[in-house]
Image: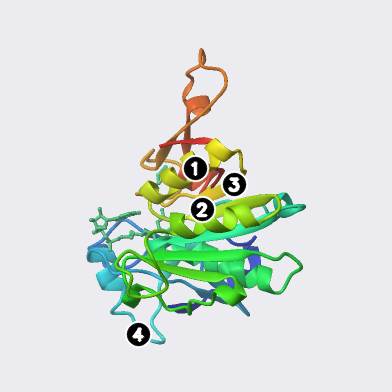
């Protein structure tokens, strides 16, 4: 879905940020639905979303010219300064492809070489082409497109062929957790964007808490042990999050 949002566009910082959409002005669905920004160009934002429940079913009924109440931009961004002297591997899974695709498109125009791995359940969930020669790898759980299996199959192969790899990932928590364990084992750095459940999106309701790893085990004040994804994230260093 593309939307004209000049005020948000003006304040955008980059891939990782999201918007919070009130999908129904009559307040039948009062909680906003967070959606990552998948692209931005000339006052326009793009989102890519999967229809899951009431909110996204309502969103899909919107027509060209309709107005949407959106808050944003919200959140931090992937830290591209950390890519210096590294070879980024971008990984998107399921509904987590949006910020990864935006980052991929930004990086295509820059000087960083990178790999892109996108995982989905089946062929119908993909809309890119599997092009290993262009370093774009698609995986499907059922083998109907690209490489059969999860993103881990490709990651385990490419990571060994690259000098100083660094991972940037977004996707379901189960996928991020497997990637995190793998990276910590082989001591490779990375960043990931989390997509938790959210209510307010403003740091008030405490609905999007994630537990952090931290070195001072004796201290347990809330701010050191927990983080609010809407306020402090969604992008975290891969070793900082405790799943
Ligand atoms: C920062 C952020 C960025 C996001 N970006 C995107 C995006 O780019 N594209 C996209 O499609 N979705 C994205 N999501 C998830 C999206 O917000 C939810 O899918 C959406 O709110 C579901 O609303 P609903 O009313 O349709 O479903 P609901 O009726 O709320 O839920 C329907 C089903 O979806 C599950 N569900 C709801 N929210 C989530 C979630 N966050 N993660 C996993 N399962 C969920 C529920 O358990 C339930 O089974 C993002 C979430 C966050 C926090
Ligand atoms: S969604 Fe309310 S505090 Fe994050």
Mark 2 or mark 4, earlier in chain: 4
Bin the neighbour count of mark 1 within 10 Å (Cα to Cα): few under 14, some 14-19, many 20 and up: some
Residue 228's x, y, as percent? 46, 40
- Tell me the CA gap for discs 3 and 4: 39 Å
Say which residue label 4 marks: 63
The label on residue 111 is none
80 above or below 232?
below
Looking at the image, is mark 4 or mark 1 earlier in the sequence?
4
Which of the two marks, 2 or 4, is nearer to us in this view? 2
The C terminus, quarter of image? top left
- The answer to which of marks 2 and 3 sits earlier in the sequence is 2
- CA neighbours of label 3 inside 10 A, class few (<14), some (14 to 19), many (20+): many
Q: Name the spot of residue 124 as percent of width and height, x first.
A: 32, 77
Q: Which residue is mark 3?
A: 190
Residue wearing tag 1:
182
Disc on the earlier residue, 1 or 3: 1
Residue 104 shows up from this direction:
yes
Mark in front: 2 vs 3? 2
Instruction: Tell me which residue sits at (32%, 73%) in the image.
Output: 59
Q: Residues within 10 Å of mark 2 (few under 14, many from 20)?
A: few
> Helix, strand, or loop for circle 4?
loop
Q: Residue at x 53, y 26 (%)?
A: 224
Q: Which residue bears the numbered disc 2?
A: 156
Name the element at disc 3: strand
Q: Earlier in the sequence, mark 1 or mark 2?
A: 2
Q: CA distance from mark 2 to mark 3?
A: 15 Å
Give above or below for 76 relative to 144.
above
Residue 183 appears in which quarter of the rendering? top right
Q: Secondary structure at mark 2?
A: helix
Locate residue 95 relative to residue 221 in the image: left or right. Answer: left
Judged by depth in the image, the label closer to the viewer, 4 or 1, is: 1
């Amino acid at each position: 879905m593309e939307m004209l949002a000049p005020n948000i566009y003006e304040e955008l910082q980059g891939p990782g940020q999201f918007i919070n959409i009130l999908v129904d002005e009559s307040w039948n669905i009062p909680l906003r639905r967070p959606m990552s920004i998948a692209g931005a160009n000339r006052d326009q934002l793009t989102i890519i979303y999967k229809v899951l429940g009431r909110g996204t079913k309502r969103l899909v009924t919107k027509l060209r010219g309709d107005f949407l109440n959106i808050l944003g931009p919200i959140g931090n961004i992937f830290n591209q300064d950390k890519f210096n002297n590294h070879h980024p591997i971008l990984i998107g899974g399921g509904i987590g492809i949006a910020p990864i695709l935006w980052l991929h498109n930004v990086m295509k125009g820059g000087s960083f070489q990178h790999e892109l791995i996108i995982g989905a359940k089946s062929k119908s969930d993909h809309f890119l082409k599997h092009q290993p020669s262009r370093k774009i790898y698609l995986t499907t759980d059922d083998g109907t497109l690209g490489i059969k299996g999860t993103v881990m199959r490709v990651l385990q192969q490419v990571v060994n062929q690259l000098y100083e790899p660094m991972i940037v990932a977004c996707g379901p928590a189960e996928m991020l957790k497997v990637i995190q364990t793998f990276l910590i084992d082989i001591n490779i750095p990375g960043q990931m964007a989390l997509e938790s459940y959210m209510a307010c999106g403003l740091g008030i309701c405490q609905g999007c808490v994630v537990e952090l790893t931290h070195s001072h085990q004796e201290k347990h004040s809330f701010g050191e042990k927990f983080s609010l994804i809407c306020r402090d994230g969604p992008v975290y260093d891969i070793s900082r999050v405790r799943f």
